[in-house]
Amino acid sequence: MTPPELPGLTIVELQRLLRAREVSPREVLQALHDRIEAVEPKIDAYLSRDLDAALDAADAADVSLPLGGIPLAIKDLISVAGQPCTCASRILRGYRALFDATVIQKLKAAGAIPFGKTNLDEFAMGSSTENSSVKPTRNPWDVARIPGGSSGGSAAAVAADAAIASLGTDTGGSIRQPAALCGVVGLKPSYGRVSRYGAVAFASSLDQIGPITKTVADSALLLEVMAGLDPNDSTSLDAPVPDYRAALQGDLKGVRLGLAKEYLSDGIDPEVRAAIDTAVAQFVSLGAEIVEVSLPHTDYAIDTYYIIATAEASANLARFDGVRYGHRAENPLNLLDHYNRTRAEGFGAEVKRRIILGTYVLSSGYYAAYYLRAQKVRTLIRQDFARAFEKVDALISPTTPEPAFKIGERSADPWRMYLADIFTIAANLAGICGISVPCGMASGDLPIGLQILGPSLGEARILQVAHGFEQSTAWHKRRPL
Ligand code: GLN
């Protein structure tokens, strides 16, 4: 194996080579660095990288550990001590994280090397990575198109072999949607499965950290390292962490998969629809049983999300006031002027739109009409899923209604942009888990993703279903560029 091929490998494949001492962690990192240098001018997936520190870590790596010597790319919203953590916002330009997020601590303890930070929509608000204040990231399959978002840098890097694997965050689809549009695997764990301590909060009742990988097995491996109770995140669940890789075994005979009729509506691109139909036939041939189910409150998911997410964002983003860190306006006239101008200069248009909307829905007089009502609808959405999971083990659907759109195509129309998450958002509202795996290609060589949703803490099952599908198809082997 010559070093230039190394960046194309999965974690599991690299582990084998590293443990057999056929390659060293330094060679892996160097090869990855060369690959990044070659493709980064085309895709712009990274915001920062620290090769020197990573090489030191590589030289010290213990390859017998679960992730010993494996380099990882991290969405620039998750704190890695000493590295920038800008959330792709002007307001955090120059800020460096002072501590490791819990997931980073765990990954480092398992031997991984978080060496670089990837681009995103500012504060994870968006579906295309065009809302980054730094630069848009491009889809490696067609650089005129968006990679999805908000974890677009993480997904594009993995797809382009400019990362072995990466981390994203998913508040309404930001792991699964870019994974689908870039042709890789993205897992949103159940709410509370993985600690968010050290991830900059967007909407605290929805956010989750999860892996973006080339295969389902790699996803299982990373989840297993990251999952579990964390005293620093009171929303993390005190539930045992299964052996997710062992759960990949076994066939899909008798597994009940639900198809929600509301998720196969007319708005779906015909090529996406055809890919899902083919995936369904594939599951049948693997012995799964397909059951039609209904999620009657689906139509309300986007509206509900944009009330709850913006309300929580408006509260969470209040901390960016230019007093302790980040951007600070020059020569303020007084304290109010300092706040006003710092925030006016520091936040981009979409973030401001959300803060304004969120503040409005929480204001006295409108709170009951919007926020409280949205919380009630959220309960109905949660009940829809609970009812469906009485009948089926997992739900399958497209991850996105269409393949990747062109850069700039939706920037002027926030509502059309919001529709990119129509199939992913409800899972966050319900707190359940979901994974996107490649299931086809649309014309122009654009990847299509299949979403598999499971109940809260149902990760082992959706990983098994995803793995069974993946291993019986060849979509995950295709690479762009
Ligand atoms: N696209 C959705 C939004 O803009 C979801 C983003 C996310 O999951 N972080 O809010």
Image: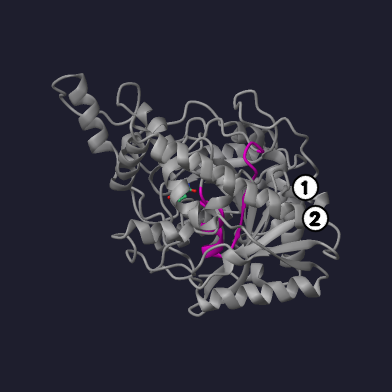
Residue 218 in view in this figure:
no
In depth, the one of 128 and 258 nearer the eye is: 258
The residue located at (80%, 75%) in the rendering is: 285
Give residue 184's position: percent from left, percent from top: 59, 61
Give residue 209's position: percent from left, percent from top: 58, 42
Q: Is residue 4 left or right of residue 468?
A: left
The residue located at (65%, 71%) in the rendering is: 475
Residue 277 magenta: no
Give residue 395's position: percent from left, percent from top: 68, 59
Q: Is residue 357 left or right of residue 58?
A: left
Circles 1 and 2: CB atoms closer than 8 Å: yes
Residue 123 in view in this figure:
yes
Q: Is residue 5 above or below residue 87?
A: below
User: What amino acid is at disc 2?
Assistant: Leu
Residue under numbered circle 2:
248
Please give the label number shown on residue 244.
1
Quarter-of-image position of residue 357: top left
